Structure formats: C-alpha cells, structure tokens
Amino acid sequence: MRRLWAAMICGVSVWWLIPGATTAAGHNITSILENKPELSSFSSYLTETNLTAEINRREGITVLAVDNAAMEALAGGGNRTLESIKDVLLLHVLVDYIDGADNETGRGAVAVPTLCQGTSTNLGSDGFVNVVRAPQAGGGESVAFLPVNVVNPTSLEPLPAFVESVEKVPNSISVIQISHFLTLPHK
C-alpha cells in the first residue's frame, strides 16, 4: 500500500514537470496556437507579456488571435514597448465564452468584458469589446469585434472581423482568429 501511495505521488509530481501539461482550467493557449504558424507571433507575445498563465488559469474565456502580419503592425517595427503591446493584448482576451461565427448577436451589440478589467489598464467601460454583426465589403454580414467606444463599425478600417475558429472547448476556451488587432481607446 505504501509503494502504491508513493508511486501515485511520484506520478503526479512528474506530471507537473511535463512541458505543455494542461492547467487547472484544462487548456494551454500555447499548445492550442502551436499548430497555427500564422499565429506564432501572437503566441510569442502572449508568452513575452506573461499573459499565457492568466489565460490558462481561466475558464469561460475567448482569445481573439491575430496573424503574424497584424502582430508586426501592432509592434510597429519595434517602436512600441512590450507593456503597450500587453495593454492591447489584454483587450484580445474576453472574459466570456463566445462560440465564433455561430455567436448570435441579433442586430445589436453584445458588450463583453476583457482582461483589461481588474488590471492596471482598467479602462472602465472602454475595457469591453462589442461583438456585433457588421456588413462585409462584398455583401453579407460577419461577426466583428469592436472596442466598446466604437459606435459605427463601418467607421473602423480595417474592421477586426471573424476569420476562423481555431479551437473550441465548450464553456472553457474559444480561440478565434480575427482579421486585425483591436485598438485601445486613447492609446
């Protein structure tokens, strides 16, 4: 019995040492993004800004990922500080589970809180993202993600719109690729 107990403790201890092991929330954002090379810069910046741990510990969240070109534009060729990039990335983590393009927003907007809430970047109501249905250039509509201070989605170019669902674990984590990064008000 003692050996069995010792083996179980060793097994659990070794599990914690395995890189990429799932977290208490049951997901690992780095592992989710590693199969998408076009999102590698986004993943790297999540790691550099220490946001991966915050994402991995939470349940019921949505991560709005952008491709490498958008991250390069956000970084401004190295002209932005890591802290200012982190402030923008906080806006890309919604503290609610959104199921990609299947999300039914009706004709209005659904305001969703982000990780900006409860941090030094707390922007009050500006730290929310509106999930809306917006007209597409070629006709039709798509799901778009807008800072809450944007009143008219057509005034925002380029429009941060749904591209594809990267990963969905119902009620745990949804990772959605969007076409452009969200911008912080007054930044």
Image: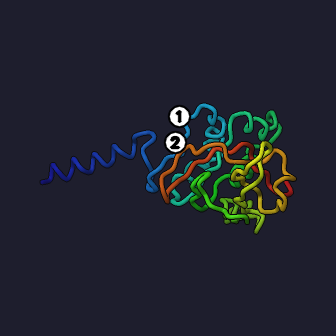
**What kind of element bears circle 1?**
loop
The residue at the point 64 percent across, 42 percent down is: 48
Q: Is residue 72 above or below residue 10?
A: above
Q: Is residue 24 left or right of residue 125?
A: left
Q: What residue type is disc 2 on?
A: Ile
Q: Is residue 83 visible?
A: no
Residue 125: percent from left, percent from top: 76, 68
Residue 6: percent from left, percent from top: 21, 50
Q: Which residue is mark 2?
A: 32
Q: Work out which residue is located at the far bottom of the displayed protein and give it.
A: 124
Q: Is residue 177 left or right of residue 34?
A: right
The residue at the point 27 percent across, 46 percent down is: 10
Q: Quadrant of residue 117?
A: bottom right
**What kind of element bears circle 2?**
helix
The residue at the point 51 percent across, 50 percent down is: 168
Residue 59: percent from left, percent from top: 51, 59
Q: Using the image as rendered, state which of residue 174 and residue 134 is in the foreground.
A: 134
Residue 161: percent from left, percent from top: 72, 48
How crowded is the residue under tag 1: few (<14 C-alpha within 10 Å), some, or many (20+)? few
Q: Is residue 128 left or right of residue 169?
A: right
Q: What residue type is disc 1 on?
A: Asn
Gap in angstroms between the C-alphas marked 2 and 1: 7 Å
How crowded is the residue under tag 2: few (<14 C-alpha within 10 Å), some, or many (20+)? some
- Circle 2/circle 1 CB separation < 8 Å: yes
- Name the image quarter holding the N terminus: bottom left
Q: Which residue is mark 1?
A: 35
